[in-house]
Every structure is written in C-alpha cells, then in structure tokens.
Image: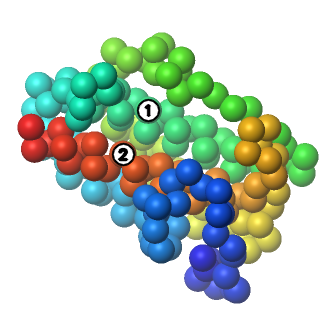
Amino acid sequence: MSDGRDMPIERWKDNPYAADLGDVDVMAALRDGPARIKAIVDALTPAQMASSYAPGKWTAAQLLVHLAQCEFVFGSRVRMALADASYVVQPFDQDAWLVREAATDGRVAFWAYYAMRYLNLELFARLSLDDRRRTLMHPERGPMIVEWVLESLAGHERHHLPHFEIIAKS
C-alpha cells in the first residue's frame, strides 16, 4: 500500500485480517471506520446493545469494549515502536481483558474507541515512510513493521463491522 506520498509499502502477507481489509488503503479504512460504526451504534436500541450476532459470541456492547481495548493496544504498539528501536510487543488475551470490562456500558465503550481512534489518526497521519517501516518484534508473529500494525487494526475493525450489522438488523 502507499502512504500517499512515497513509494508503496509491502502489505503484510500474514495479516489475519487481510481479507477483511482487502485492497482498501489502510489510512482510508482507519478514517472511515468510526463513522460506519457510529451510524450503526447510534441506531441500536438497549436490547440490541445487549444482543449478540450469534450464540456464544460477544454482545454489541462487549464488541465495543473490545474495539476500544484494541484501539488502545494497537495505538500503544505504534507509539512504543516509534520510541524504542528494540520494542517487543506484549501480547494480550482478548478474552481475559474483556472479562474485566464485560459489563461496561456500550455507549461509553464506543466513545472511548471513537476518541482513541481520532487521537491515533492524528499520529498515524503524520508518520513518515521511515516511521511506517519502523520495525518491532511480536513474540508470536515475528518481526513486523508499524504499517502492519495499522493494517491489522484496520482489518480487525472491518472484521467486526458485519457483526454490528447483524445485530442492528435483529
């Protein structure tokens, strides 16, 4: 993909959310995600907010907590990689994290996600090509670059969009 200013940056071939991101520019995906989710969340009733898209899956409110947590983690990973040339990612267990905050109000979680996304976008939009190629190490996935963190974040959000759409139609 391109950063809009310089030569393309290679897409992450092992991105678990590559299919969800597709060929969409990573920054375009990161910019349009909040509005798409907000449009859905604004229309959810309290019953829908407490509903899931499938049996045994997270509710809309829990998905919003999860998105807020991921926005925090992935934004922190970018910041740490930019500040520390030998940064090693601290993996996290998304289910264990959600257990602690599963009862969080969905609208509170949405606004936390929304605010953090816009804070992150301010940083991401200013990254140089060298910043986006900055390396970091993930103990489970191996060497990575900042661009791949952005791609993962964008693809992850797009992965969950259909879940919100299913809940909204229920």
- Is residue 154 visible in the rendered structure shown here? no
**Relative image position of residue 38 (x, y in whole percent):** 26, 49
Q: Position of residue 145 (x, y in %)?
A: 75, 59
Identify the residue at image location x=52%, y=38%.
70
Up the image or down, 167 lies above or below 142; here it is above
Counting every numbered tag in the picture gives 2
Vertical side of 25 occupied by 15: above or below: above
Q: Quadrant of residue 60?
A: top left
Q: Which callout, 1 or 2, points at the residue further toward the start of the chain?
A: 1
Please give the name of the residue rendered at 11% of the width and 25% of the height, measured from the top-left corner: 47
Colour pattern of the rendering:
rainbow
Whether residues under marks 1 and 2 lie with C-beta atoms below 8 angstroms apart, the answer is: yes
Residue pointed to by mark 2: 160
Q: Does residue 51 appear to the left or right of 57 in the view shown?
A: left
- CA gap, disc 1 and disc 2: 10 Å
Quadrant holding the N terminus = bottom right
**Residue marked by disc 1:** 66
Residue sitting at x 35%, y 33%: 63
Amino acid found under the numbered disc labelled 1: His
In the picture shown, does residue 132 fall above or below 41?
Answer: below
Residue 57 locus on image (x, y percent): 32, 27
Mark in the foreground, 1 or 2: 2
- Residues 18 and 136: in front is 18
Tag 2: amino acid: His
- Residue 94's disc is none
With 112 as the anchor, is 41 left or right in this view? left
SS at badge 2: helix
Determine the residue positioned at 46% across, 14% down: 99
Circle 1: element type = helix
Q: Quadrant of the C terminus?
A: top left
